[in-house]
Amino acid sequence: MNWQDVLADPSLKNLPYKIELNQEGKIEMSPASNRHGWLQAKIIALLSRVQEHGTVLSECSIETSTGVKVADVVWFSQEFWNIHVFETPFRAAPEICIEIISPSNSRKEIREKIELYTNQGAQEVWTCNLDGLMQFYTAKETLEHSTLIPVFPMQLEL
């Protein structure tokens, strides 16, 4: 199965789960809580407020070496957009990819996503736990704060 098959399959529409494809083309799903959705909306609103240039997108599909992954939130520049427009999935990762960590996510899974997104070109990968604590990563290190958007808070107000 490829991503276009997933998008076209009527039985997969309106599921209350995040769908991704693994390297064998098999669907992987994880349920999202309302808290997850609230944090996602909060990050989108904050990014839109503090970063006047670029675009914020939710549920962004990205082709990786192990299948299609869906970042909860991404930020990308006009330059990225000019190259990728409405590719689905994006063949490269946007500059910032953000994952909200749910109880169903293992540390190994999050580490793998950080590596997958940075291998596809993401300059930073951010994570947000369910308490609103943000962490910022590059391919090589954990950052004190985002270097691309340094004013983004390290703790979201709940």
Image (cartoon, rainbow, N blue to C red):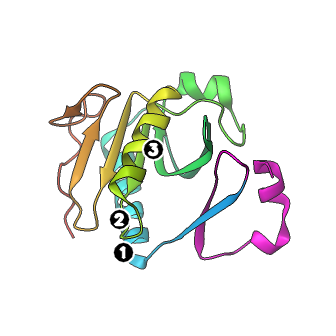
Residue density around tag 1, few if under 14, some if 14–19, many if 20 or more, within 10 Å: some
Residue at mark 1 to residue at mark 3: CA–CA distance:
21 Å
Q: Is residue 46 left or right of residue 116?
A: left
Q: Is residue 35 above or below residue 148?
A: below
Identity, as a three-letter code, of the amino acid under mark 2: Leu
Q: Earlier in the sequence, mark 3 or mark 2?
A: 2
- The circle on residue 113 is 3
For disc 2, the marked residue is 39
For disc 1, the marked residue is 35
Identity, as a three-letter code, of the amino acid under mark 1: Arg
Q: Is residue 60 above or below residue 53?
A: below
Rendered residue at 25%/35% (across/down)? 146
Residue 37: x and y in percent read 43, 69
Residue at mark 1 to residue at mark 2: CA–CA distance:
6 Å
Q: Is 36 in front, or is 6?
A: 6
Specify whether residue 54 is in view: no
